[in-house]
Image: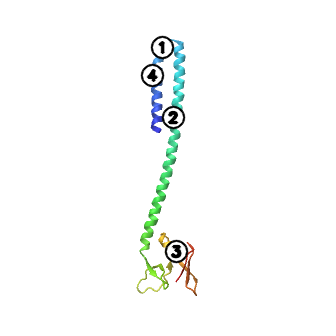
Amino acid sequence: MVVAEAASVVTTLKNAVDIVDKLRNSDSKEDLRSVASSLTEMLISARLAALALIEQKALLIDERSTLLERVKSLESEIRTLADFDLSSEKYERVQTAKGRFVFREMGKSGDNSPRPYLCPNCFSKKSISIMQLWDTEYQQYYCQACKSDLYF
């Protein structure tokens, strides 16, 4: 559409130049009025086409801006997923006493620090959420992020 509008402006201006050339060779007042009227119409048409071009340019600039923001958002999401993939290598899948699978940070030899269980539901969605012990009698763990619970 922008190309068609630009071509229209160029054609209108070329026709206006042709009319001015005719005007130079004319001696009649009637010819002058007719040419002036045609020239005015052409200039109005060219101005409207130019305004349409300006409007389309503004729309294209807005669209470009929106697309650039989307690209930045997707790049950020890709970095987040890549970071998760790198950090997920520190975790291992373990089976609970009741046969359920959860994730846990890999232990280092000689390291007796606590290794909390991670929610398998959240982990599959590339999010790390620690399972909280909810009921010690039944060994029930609860994930605050996705609200799931597991009996160990």
Q: Residues within 10 Å of mark 1 (few under 14, many from 20)?
A: few
For the residues marked 3 and 1, what is the alpha-carbon distance in whole angstroms?
A: 87 Å
Amino acid type at image mark 2: Ala
Residue topped by disc 4: 18
Q: How many marks?
A: 4
Ranked by sequence position, the earlier of labels 3 and 2 is 2
For the residues marked 3 and 2, what is the alpha-carbon distance in whole angstroms?
A: 57 Å
Q: Report the disc number at residue 129.
A: 3
Q: Is residue 137 left or right of residue 79?
A: right
Q: Report the disc number at residue 26.
A: 1
For the residues marked 2 and 4, what is the alpha-carbon distance in whole angstroms?
A: 20 Å
Ranked by sequence position, the earlier of labels 1 and 4 is 4
Quadrant of residue 18 within the rendered picture = top left
Ranked by sequence position, the earlier of labels 3 and 1 is 1
Amino acid type at image mark 3: Ser
Whether pointer 1 and pointer 4 mark residues with C-beta atoms closer than 8 Å, the reply is no
* Identity of the residue drawn at 45% across and 29% down: 11
Ranked by sequence position, the earlier of labels 4 and 3 is 4
Residue topped by disc 2: 50
Give the SS element for disc 3: loop
